[in-house]
Amino acid sequence: MFTKRLGPVPRCYGTAGCPDIFELENGDFAIIGADITAAADLLPPSAGCGPGERIVRIPRKTLVLAKRDIPDRL
């Protein structure tokens, strides 16, 4: 299911988890981050969080460091 990590291996010493980004076999991505779904009512009117979805926060550093591994095309 998980084919590769995007970005470097996170270094989160002394914590229960670590933000991370993975590419899946089907080309989709999986994100490990803090669940901030409770803030869904603060989303812009054009956005929504449906049943079975979660809003996940990752540090800016995690995404910026993964940039080189994110494909440019679909």
Image (tube, grey):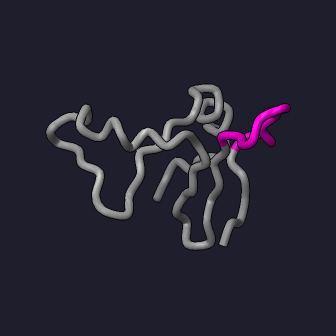
Q: Residue at x 28, y 58 (%)?
A: 50
Q: Residue at x 66, y 40 (%)?
A: 19
Horizontal and vertical percent position of residue 72: 52, 48
Q: Is residue 10 left or right of residue 51?
A: right
Q: Residue at x 61, y 30 (%)?
A: 64
Q: Is 9 contained in the magenta span? A: yes
Q: Quadrant for residue 29, please give it.
A: bottom right
Q: Is residue 28 left or right of residue 48?
A: right
Is 59 above or below relative to 71?
above
Is 5 above or below relative to 7?
below
Is 47 above or below relative to 52?
above
Q: Is 60 contained in the magenta span? A: no
Q: Quadrant for residue 65, please give it.
A: top right
Q: Is residue 57 left or right of residue 25?
A: left
Horizontal and vertical percent position of residue 57: 50, 36
Horizontal and vertical percent position of residue 30: 57, 56
Q: Main secondary structure of the magenta part?
A: loop
Horizontal and vertical percent position of residue 9: 80, 42
How many numbered dots are placed on residues in this image? 0
Q: Residue at x 59, y 35 (%)?
A: 63
As rendered, which of 28 and 17 lies closer to the eye?
Answer: 17
As rendered, which of 35 and 24 lies closer to the eye?
Answer: 35
Q: Which residues are magenta?
A: 7-19
Which quadrant of the rendered structure holds the N terminus?
Answer: bottom right
